């Protein structure tokens, strides 16, 4: 059972987590060009949310996203219409031509790099993403981080037994801001971290949901 709606969280301004390395526990996971002079057009993010797990995605669109879900709940990012302010990714520069950050809550760590498995987000506290294989003899479900890898036009739901996306001295990406790097854009909302992988694909990650398409 699923519901789909265009995420209206990103409106008139425009751009989770892996558990961190460093001090973040195994299930916890913290970038290099300047921000665009003009705010990019808001992406369109569609979320499919089954009863327990689901999928979410995003793609850039010249038009503002519209809500197609008839009854979004108060926790849905679709209800957040606050403007997004792009940040300079140089503030989040990390070793090896990467950018990395964490959510203000510290639950989500994200990184964008230039290799196949260097981009994505991971949360210490999140539902199991639909399609992720989280069966391992060495860790319980509660010990695993949950999140997504992203490559251009593709999102892969995953469970992590270590910090994949943490960077040294990770800085928080403030709510209602976005970061764009290497063709990916991520949006920090109080409800969730929302990342656009391009091609109509992306994900939404929070303590309440881990959805992608």
Image: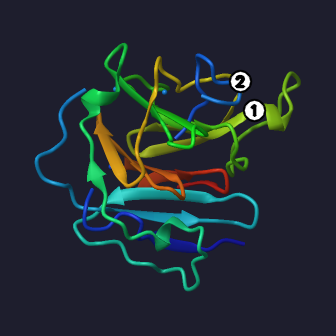
* Nearest to the observer: residue 39 or residue 213: 39
Q: Is residue 52 above or below residue 180?
A: below
- List the single residue furthest toward the left: 37
Q: How many marks?
A: 2
* Nearest to the observer: residue 205 or residue 28: 28
Q: Residue at x 66, y 71 (%)?
A: 2
Disc 2, SS: loop
* Neighbours of disc 1 within 10 Å: few (<14), some (14-19), many (20+): many
Q: Residue at x 67, y 48 (%)?
A: 129
User: Where does residue 32 sit, x and y in percent of width and height?
Assistant: 25, 26
Disc 1, SS: loop
- Asked whether, in this view, residue 104 is left or right of residue 32, the answer is right
Residue behind mark 2:
26
User: Where does residue 158 sit, x and y in percent of width and height?
Assistant: 65, 37
Q: Are marks 2 and 1 in contact (CB under 8 Å)?
A: yes
Note whether residue 11 is visible. Answer: yes
């Amino acid at each position: 059972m699923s519901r789909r709606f265009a995420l209206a969280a990103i409106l008139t301004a425009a751009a989770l987590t892996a558990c961190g390395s460093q001090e973040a526990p195994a299930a916890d996971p913290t970038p290099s060009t300047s921000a665009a002079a003009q705010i990019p057009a808001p992406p369109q993010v569609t979320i499919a949310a089954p009863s327990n797990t689901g999928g979410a995605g995003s793609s850039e669109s010249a038009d503002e996203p519209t809500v197609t879900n008839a009854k979004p709940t108060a926790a849905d990012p679709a209800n957040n219409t606050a403007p997004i302010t792009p940040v300079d990714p140089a503030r989040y520069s990390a070793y090896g031509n990467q950018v990395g950050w964490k959510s203000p809550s510290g639950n989500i760590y994200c990184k964008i790099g230039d290799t196949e498995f260097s981009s994505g987000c991971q949360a210490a506290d999140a539902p199991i993403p639909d399609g992720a294989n989280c069966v391992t003899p060495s860790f319980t479900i509660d010990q695993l981080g949950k999140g997504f890898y992203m490559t251009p036009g593709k999102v892969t739901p995953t469970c992590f037994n270590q910090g994949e996306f943490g960077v040294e001295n990770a800085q928080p990406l403030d709510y209602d801001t976005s970061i764009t790097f290497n063709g990916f854009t991520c949006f920090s909302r109080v409800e969730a971290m929302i990342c656009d992988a391009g091609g109509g694909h992306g994900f939404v990650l929070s303590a309440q949901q881990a959805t992608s398409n």
